[in-house]
Each structure stands twice: as C-alpha cells, then as structure tokens.
Amino acid sequence: MSKNRVKPDPRLSREEFHEKFPPEVRWKSDNYSHLMEQPTLFYAVALILAFIGAGDGLNAVLAWVYVALRIAHSLVQASINIILLRFALFAAASLVLLAMAVRAALLLL
C-alpha cells in the first residue's frame, strides 16, 4: 500500500480500492478471495466423508486431485493469470468437487 501511495479509506468500494493497484497485485488479492469461496464447500464435503468413514479410496483420490487443481489455479492466478488456463483449472476442480459432493450425498441417503 505504501509503495502505491494508497491510504485505507473505508468509504471506498472494493472496486474503487482495487483500481489503485496494478493488475499483478489485484490478481493475488482476488486469488485470496477465491480461496474463501468454493473451497469452503470442499472442507464440508471432506469432513462429511471422513465422519461417515468414507474418506478413503476414490474419495481420497478425488480430494487430493481437487487440492492439486486448486493449487495450480492459485499459482496461475497469482503469477501469469492466463484466463483460459485459469478457467480450465477452475472447471476441472469444480467437476471433481461436484463428484465428491454427489458421492457424499449418495452415501448419506
């Protein structure tokens, strides 16, 4: 913030605040925000699978694949930020998480 001479102003919207920083800085901030969204569903599904004793086998493989895809997504977003690559990684991670959620739901029913 000091490098860009930005003073915190609570009256600014998130967009107005972000406009004061170069894109490379905003990518990292956006990535941090993204880690508070979909991954929270992953934590819930992983905990459910663990609590019902189904956290091994294919469910464990899916969980680690999801984690690897999200790490790759974070690295891409925080560094080179190629949108199509980011989207492909996000879509793949979303499909893996969907598979985990469906498997957990079927086991609970």
Image (cartoon, rainbow, N blue to C red):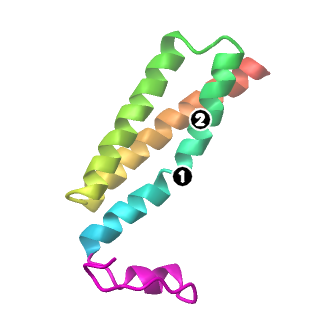
In terms of secondary structure, where does tag 2 sit? Answer: helix
What's the residue at 20%, 58% (across, down)? 80
The question of residue 2 being in magenta is answered with: yes
Q: Quadrant of residue 20?
A: bottom left
- Give the residue at mark 1: 36
Which residue is found at the position 35% from the left and 54% from the top?
87
**Which residue lies at the image location 32% right of the left edge and 53% below the top edge?**
86
In the depicted view, which residue is nearer to us: 9 or 73? 9
Give the percent coordinates (x, y) of residue 84: 28, 57
| Image vertical order of residue 94 relative to residue 12, above or below | above
Q: Residues within 10 Å of mark 2 (few under 14, many from 20)?
A: few
How packed mark 1 is, by other alpha carbons closer than 10 Å (few <14, some 14-19, many 20 or more), is few
Residue 30 figure quarter:
bottom left
69 left or right, relative to 11? left
**What's the amino acid at mark 2?**
Tyr
Residue 24 percent across, percent down from the top left: 25, 68
User: Camera-side residue: 41 or 7?
Assistant: 7
Q: Which residue position holds label 2?
A: 43
